Amino acid sequence: MSESRRKPTLAVVGATGAVGTVMLDILSTREDVYGEIRLVASPRSAGKKLTVRGEQVEVQALAPEVFEGVDIAMFDTPDGISAQWAPIAARHGAVAVDNSGAFRMDPDVPLVVPEVNAEAARNRPKGIISNPNCTTLSMIVAMGALHRHYGLRELVVASYQAASGAGQAGIDTLYDQLEKVGGHRDIGERAGDVRRVVGDDLGPFPAPLAMNVVPWAGSLKEDGWTSEELKVRNESRKILGLPDLRVSATCVRVPVVTTHSLAVHAVFERPVDQREAQAVLAGSPGVVLVDDPENFEFPTPADVVGTDPTWVGRVRRSLDDPNALDLFLCGDNLRKGAALNTAQIAELVAAELTS
Amino acid sequence: MSESRRKPTLAVVGATGAVGTVMLDILSTREDVYGEIRLVASPRSAGKKLTVRGEQVEVQALAPEVFEGVDIAMFDTPDGISAQWAPIAARHGAVAVDNSGAFRMDPDVPLVVPEVNAEAARNRPKGIISNPNCTTLSMIVAMGALHRHYGLRELVVASYQAASGAGQAGIDTLYDQLEKVGGHRDIGERAGDVRRVVGDDLGPFPAPLAMNVVPWAGSLKEDGWTSEELKVRNESRKILGLPDLRVSATCVRVPVVTTHSLAVHAVFERPVDQREAQAVLAGSPGVVLVDDPENFEFPTPADVVGTDPTWVGRVRRSLDDPNALDLFLCGDNLRKGAALNTAQIAELVAAELTS
């Protein structure tokens, strides 16, 4: 920036979507580091007014001109939109912080979780920084803390992913289905009767989600793996700087509106200790330990949704491997899993630009 | 039996419970190998009439006399009732087939899954045979088939367990909660609002189950493990005859009425092949392979509930371990997970007694 004391101008692209909506809330409640904030969305949302920092701001249609004078441009947009427009924002001199999958595995684009690898954000040859996938983000702050202490070797992950991971359509579909099944006290004991009550409109999911779990998220990739499962593997490796980390993930959608949960089996280089691991997690920024099973205290999505941290509980040393931990964790997939981490990256950049 | 051609007399103890109800259905639809069938329950259910094999049968109160002349006595009762009464049935000359946890780890009581270790049922020094826990049963037929082919070394399991695993109270609680949340389109985005709508009566669960997942099943055991998680480990070892099998399980309740699902990471002695493993599963009695991700075909609890087999899909070779498979499977926890396996064990005994 020409004048180092000017507060940076921010553009929020995709301001009207599920993540964008949470982003405006986050921008209104965190320390205000920005000058102008421009809201950008598809042409059909242009002219709509949204509230950010207590003020009404008119949404502008996505076009090259909206990036003029912008220092940081957040993209909460589908892969194709990001792939096309993040480079345009960068050419206009903005640092693009992209929440899509378009650039995450690009070796010239850092993939950043501020609690884990903040320093990576400074090296951005394309002027683009990527925000990880929400499922990876649900666990990576906790895993990063344990990795620094014990040296991570392998992750086996099973996910319990919320409907909002599939966007507003996912949320709407789950509410629709819950409304239809609510009050039926005779379904769920015979194959197909939930499907009959829910009807044919399954929204973005390949099977009914209410009263069900669906072992599918993302699209089909090689050898039966889903894009979501490969993201957990590839993004964990990149963020932690462990290109040979062994990762197996099975991603499953559950009838929860927002907040992803994961059951994690983590194998380390060194022997682990239950109490010590709990202390490491409790002392890590961005992590809250809720682990008192005697009093039935452990995180559940309904109890932690809408909050910032990664919530960890059920921490146990594996009975048959002194180097392994089993645990259960929850993270709001729209906040830390998307908008919050994007905001944190943008704040890193803002601090760098004004320092 | 004095006369080898007489059909054995069966007693069903706990005939009025969630599993007992499914048992009467199973006894009415499978090949009829029994002479008299006596229905037994607690004194408060005595006199009630239930239908089995198309006939009304009066429920008798549990007392030593009900076992007179009984050849096989099934117990679908809590641990304490089984612990007290299965030996009484055995003293009256019956073979007790017990679905509780009372005897499963007793070295003098075989733990039997007919597709895996039918021969173990013949060696029953106490006259008692145990039926495994429903979560173990949801996966063990499939795992037994893969073990015979590749030699099982380690299991990492995350469960998606149905409400009916906590009995009729679990089913009722989930229906109550689904009725309360159905139609609310503004909950699930802020911590605690599902809890507020659901109210204080959580039934047998330590947190709301509707619109949530709860990382808890069973009771607290040493070092933070639950009884359910230890059962998966200890029972898998005993059934498969692998006392050193490495097992880590995290058991999680999901808002599904009936049918447990599991994400399984299985490590073998020998390298695995995806197509071969699929063929092994497809060719195993008691297992159905539904694994065509290109057409979004995989098992979900809502699609398979009320059926007998273990349904397996999402079979993948681990990307970082040629000896490991990742898969997702579903099994009806009231049928194969409880009543059906008990019925199959009883049929083994009936065949032995009449041979």
Image (cartoon, coloured by chain):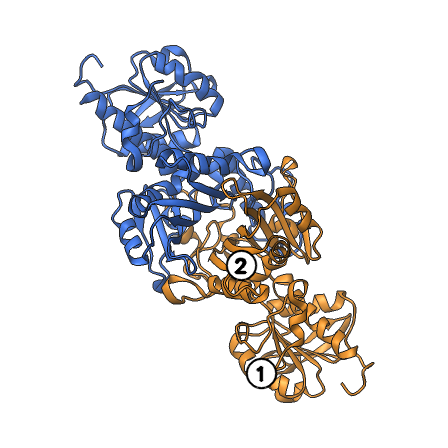
Chain colours: A blue, B orange
- Disc 2 with disc 1 on a shared chain: yes
- The residues tagged by marks 2 and 1 sit, at their Cα atoms, a distance apart of 27 Å
Q: Secondary structure at mark 2?
A: helix
Q: Please report, as a chain letter, where disc 1 is located.
A: B
- At a point 69% along the width and 57% down the height, the residue shown is B286
- At a point 27% along the width and 53% down the height, the residue shown is A279
- Give the side of residue B78 with respect to residue A34, left or right: right
> Which kind of residue does numbered mark 1 sit on?
Trp
User: Is B137 drawn above or below residue A213 in the view shown?
Assistant: below
Q: Quadrant of the C terminus of chain B?
A: bottom right
> Which kind of residue does numbered mark 2 sit on?
Ala
Find disc 1 in the rendering and name its residue: B85
Q: Nearer the viewer, mark 2 or mark 1?
A: 1
Circle number at residue B163: 2
- Give the side of residue A171 with respect to residue B30, left or right: left
Q: Position of residue A146 (x, y in %)?
A: 32, 47
Q: Position of residue A16 (x, y in %)?
A: 42, 26
User: Which quadrant of the structure image shows residue B74?
Assistant: bottom right
- Give the side of residue B309 with respect to residue A178, left or right: right
Please state which of residues B68 and B50 is positioned toward the viewer in this rendering: B68
Q: Please report, as a chain letter, where disc 2 is located.
A: B
Residue contact between numbered discs 2 and 1, judged by CB atoms under 8 Å: no
Q: Quadrant of the N terminus of chain B?
A: bottom right
User: Which quadrant of the structure image shows residue A11?
Assistant: top left
